[in-house]
């Protein structure tokens, strides 16, 4: 820590007033999605043999030691999370937020923001999680006064002290969380930029001049927030699973990304990296230096034995389910987030085909799957139920319904409307094909829609299968909420996909051009 002695008119002040720069290390994670165990290079489960051979990444037992080492490198450090601890593996399916709370307390987090997946099971599970954690969870851009489980308990911001300095932390959640999850009618989301500025102004009025936003909003919106607000020093991001790095050639941007005087960071997802940003503030609270790099949590990071034992204990009830071999794959089935949210992908074809095959005999012609529901790839070889559940962890059920061709076109337009943002609404399809042009404005991008080999008829009624989340308006598919003869209580999508895989021998993933980008 640098220290300077204040001099006035060439004379030393007899009262020896000392001014000091303040150094802070911000350790951060985001989009962990219940990956308490190590993951493979495909972000799915990693076998114990592969882990022993050094082929795995992440896992809380490694993260514990990575955080410990990073704290040892710093005089002042905080550990924060950019949201979406919930959902993604059988651990969440079985324990909901309880194991996440236990592990986050063990790691010693200082704060986190609410991610959209923290609302997947409604306010009840979030409230239970809040009662179990030893640190604040924050959300500035929502009114929760009409939700008794959260009202008066879920703060917009908080102030913590570290190394004699007060730090203002502000939480931010996607404005469209009501479309992405199940927050219920008592939670009303508002404009993120206005919400952040309001909290910055309030904290500044209290004399807080070092302000960090924990933003589960995506890399693009974080840059807008930095440009359109004043007083924000650092934004710790999430939601878009962006890897920011100065050394990785697959990075989405530099670490940190500077917009004016605001430093923006994000560390991919699934506990594969620990973000480590070193910030130097001057005496007025202005950032004068921000530098760092995400730490890859690979086999070079040792696993903490006690944490390893606790996770093994928690995993015991899950073993029978996830170790059951249900099928085989002839090659890797690509479920990469960047691919599936932008174009036709092999995992999207598998899931959409499986959905349609299950109900085609009922007169259903078309399947639409939201890419946000596809959470991992599956590698070649035996496929376990655990792997299928990692791809499809949300316990969604098959939904069948009937809509006119015009509504199907509207749905496809919704699906490609946020293509630039990598939004999860991007549609993977079966039984139809279409083209889209992102150079056109949202709402006018889709063309050449074919059902089977026939151009779509805007006035004809078509049978459609999707999942209950999409059918009830999730990911912006509000046009399906008023569908005819809707039935939302079909079998679990993961079971349907596993059964489809099992019927086909070693499944051969493929692309066939059903979605084309002009």
Image (cartoon, helix red, strand yellow):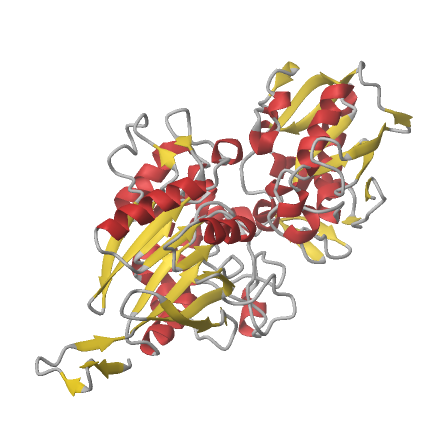
Which residue is the extreme one toward the left?
A: 14
Q: Is residue 377 above or below residue 117?
A: below
> What residue is rendered at 53% in x and 46% in y?
321
Residue 419 image position (x, y, % from top left):
67, 43
> What residue is rendered at 73% in x and 24% in y?
408
Q: Total of numbered circles in the picture? A: 0
The front one of 207 and 255 is 207
Quarter of image, res 156? top left
On screen, residue 23 versus residue 517, left or right, reads left
On screen, residue 425 versus residue 362, left or right, reads left
> What residue is rendered at 76% in x and 45% in y?
344
Q: Is residue 459 visible?
A: yes
Residue 183 image position (x, y, % from top left):
42, 31
Quarter of image, res 485? top right
Tell me the quarter of the image containing the C terminus.
top right
Quarter of image, res 145? top left
On screen, residue 89 versus residue 277, left or right, reads right
Tell me the quarter of the image containing the N terminus.
bottom left
């Amino acid at each position: 820590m640098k220290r300077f002695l204040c001099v006035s008119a060439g004379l030393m002040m007899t009262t020896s007033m000392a001014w000091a720069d303040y150094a802070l290390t911000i350790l951060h994670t985001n989009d962990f999605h219940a990956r308490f165990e190590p993951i493979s290079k495909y972000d799915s489960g990693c076998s114990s043999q592969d882990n022993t051979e050094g082929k795995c990444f992440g896992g809380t037992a490694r993260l514990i030691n990575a955080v410990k080492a990073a704290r040892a490198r710093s005089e002042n450090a905080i550990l924060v999370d950019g949201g979406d601890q919930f959902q993604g593996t059988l651990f969440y399916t079985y324990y909901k937020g309880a194991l996440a709370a236990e592990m986050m307390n063990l790691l010693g987090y200082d704060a986190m923001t609410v991610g959209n997946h923290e609302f997947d099971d409604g306010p009840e599970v979030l409230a239970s999680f809040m009662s179990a954690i030893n640190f604040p969870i924050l959300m500035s851009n929502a009114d929760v006064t009409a939700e008794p489980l959260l009202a008066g308990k879920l703060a917009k911001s908080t102030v913590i002290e570290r190394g004699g300095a007060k730090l203002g932390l502000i939480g931010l959640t996607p404005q469209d969380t009501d479309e992405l999850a199940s927050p219920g009618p008592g939670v009303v989301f508002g404009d993120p930029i206005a919400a952040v500025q309001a909290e910055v102004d309030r904290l500044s009025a209290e004399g807080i001049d070092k302000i960090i936003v924990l933003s589960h909003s995506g890399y693009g919106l974080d840059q807008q927030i930095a440009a359109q607000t004043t007083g924000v020093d650092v934004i710790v991001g999430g939601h878009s699973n962006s890897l920011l790095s100065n050394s990785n050639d697959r990075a989405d941007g530099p670490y940190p990304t500077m917009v004016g005087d605001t430093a923006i960071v994000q560390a991919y997802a699934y506990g594969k990296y620990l973000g480590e940003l070193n910030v130097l503030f001057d005496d007025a609270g202005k950032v004068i230096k921000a530098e760092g790099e995400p730490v890859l949590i690979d086999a070079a990071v040792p696993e903490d034995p006690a944490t390893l034992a606790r996770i093994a204990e928690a995993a015991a009830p899950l073993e029978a389910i996830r170790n059951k071999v249900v099928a085989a794959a002839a090659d890797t089935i690509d479920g990469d987030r960047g691919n599936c949210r932008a174009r036709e992908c092999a995992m999207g074809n598998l899931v959409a085909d499986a959905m349609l095959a299950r109900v085609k005999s009922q007169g259903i012609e078309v399947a639409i799957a939201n890419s946000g529901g596809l959470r991992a790839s599956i590698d070649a070889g035996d496929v376990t139920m655990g792997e299928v559940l990692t791809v499809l962890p949300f316990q969604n059920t098959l939904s069948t319904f009937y809509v006119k061709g015009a509504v199907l076109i509207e749905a496809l337009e919704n699906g490609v409307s946020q293509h630039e943002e990598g939004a999860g609404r991007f549609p993977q399809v079966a039984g139809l094909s279409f083209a889209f042009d992102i150079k056109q404005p949202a709402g006018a991008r889709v063309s050449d829609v074919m059902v089977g080999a026939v151009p779509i008829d805007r006035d004809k009624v078509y049978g459609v299968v999707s999942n209950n989340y999409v059918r009830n308006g999730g990911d912006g598919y509000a046009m399906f909420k008023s569908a005819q003869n809707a039935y939302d209580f079909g079998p679990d999508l993961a079971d349907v996909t596993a059964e489809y895989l099992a019927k086909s021998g070693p499944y051969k993933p493929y692309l066939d051009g059903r979605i084309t980008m002009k």
